[in-house]
């Protein structure tokens, strides 16, 4: 019976090392509560900005809503997805950076194409529209 005990302890140690080998935290009630409160605040402020018609310039309001959205994404990644540079050897952060690069390329390329299509489209008068098939 003593022969089985070391094998069991080795298996338990290997399982423990395998299951807890990463540095990711699983959060606590305090961190989830902090994330929730920050999320509510970061939702309420843009809602107030839009519904209260705080700024006359819609571009300023839109920019602030976008900024609060980006901040809220970061809050969700930190407090709910537990992403940091230590978890899984930094691969989650690397995947995040890659995703951000791809999204920036796709968005900027789409905006560039739409801008050039708009700039190079022929202006049509109502008379030309009537003659269209």
Image: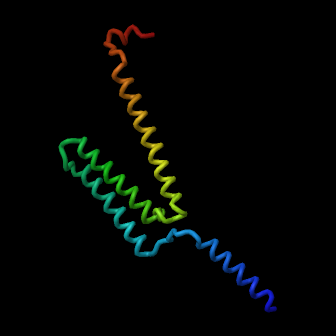
Q: Is residue 31 above or below residue 52?
A: below
* Coordinates of residue 110 in the picture (x, y in percent): 42, 33
53 or 97, which is in the foreground? 97
Q: Which of the colour schemes (rainbow, by chain, secondary structure, one colour) is used?
A: rainbow
Q: Is residue 21 toward the left or the right of residue 3 in the image? A: left
Q: Nearer the viewer, residue 75 or 56?
A: 75
Q: Residue at x 36, y 28 (%)?
A: 115
Q: Is residue 116 left or right of residue 85?
A: left
Residue found 45% across the figure and 47% down from its top:
100
Residue 118 % position (x, y): 35, 24
Q: Is residue 104 above or below residue 4?
A: above
For residue 75, which quarter of the picture? Answer: bottom left
**Residue reaching furthest to the bottom:** 2
Give the x, y percent position of residue 4.
79, 86
**The quadrant where residue 116 appears:** top left
Which quadrant of the structure image shows residue 17?
bottom right
**Looking at the image, is 56 positioned above or below residue 80?**
above
Quadrant the N terminus occupies? bottom right
Horizontal side of 63 relative to 105 (left or right) equals left
At x 35% / y 52%, what residue is drawn? Answer: 69
Q: Residue at x 37, y 10 (%)?
A: 130
Q: Position of residue 62 (x, y in %)?
A: 28, 45
**Count of marks, rendered view:** 0
Q: Where 46 sits versus 79, above or below?
A: above
Of the pair 82 and 97, the residue shown nearer to us: 97
Quadrant in which the C terminus is drawn: top left
């Amino acid at each position: 019976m003593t022969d089985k005990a070391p094998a069991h302890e080795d298996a338990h140690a290997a399982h423990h090392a395998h299951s807890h080998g990463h540095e990711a935290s699983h959060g606590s009630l305090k961190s989830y509560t902090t994330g929730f409160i920050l999320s509510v605040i970061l939702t309420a402020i843009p809602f107030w900005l839009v519904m209260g018609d705080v700024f006359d310039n819609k571009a300023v309001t839109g920019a602030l809503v976008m900024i609060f959205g980006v901040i809220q994404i970061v809050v969700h990644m930190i407090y709910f997805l537990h992403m940091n540079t230590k978890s899984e050897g930094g691969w989650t952060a690397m995947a995040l950076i890659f995703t951000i690069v791809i999204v920036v390329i796709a968005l900027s390329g789409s905006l560039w194409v739409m801008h050039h299509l708009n700039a190079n489209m022929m202006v049509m008068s109502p008379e030309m529209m009537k003659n269209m098939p």
